Amino acid sequence: MDALTPKQAKIARLVAEGATNREIADRLFISRRTVDHHLRNIFATLGIRSRVQLSRLLP
């Protein structure tokens, strides 16, 4: 998780809590496309392919 930017870490935590991309976008005042972009980068950085895998990585 240290490899993620603060914004990516926040998005990752929200995903782990079960928030949808729309909910994340609304909470962070960003577009859904921006959330998608961050998730793609998070997945690539962590070497994972799904939200489920992301949730398992977070405590």
Image: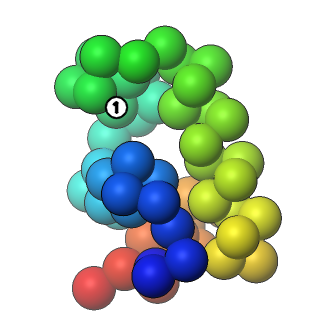
Q: Is residue 49 left or right of residue 24?
A: right
Front residue of 13 and 2:
2
Image position of 28 with respect to 55: above or below: above
Residue placed at 32% from the left, 41% from the top? 19
The part of the image, by quadrant, that contains residue 20 is: top left
Quarter holding the C terminus is bottom left
Crowding at dot 1, Cα within 10 Å, few <14 / some 14-19 / many 20+, comes out as many
Residue placed at 46% from the left, 53% from the top? 8
Identify the residue under disc 1: 24
Image position of 47 with respect to 27: above or below: below
Kindly state the secondary structure of the residue where label 1 is placed: helix
Residue 30, given in percent of the width and then of the height, sits at 41, 18
Residue placed at 61% from the left, 47% from the top? 39
**Residue 58 appears in the figure:** yes
Q: Is residue 14 left or right of residue 47?
A: left
Q: Amino acid at mark 1?
A: Ile
Image position of 36 with respect to 16: above or below: above
Residue placed at 70% from the left, 53% from the top? 41
Residue 16, given in percent of the width and then of the height, sits at 35, 61
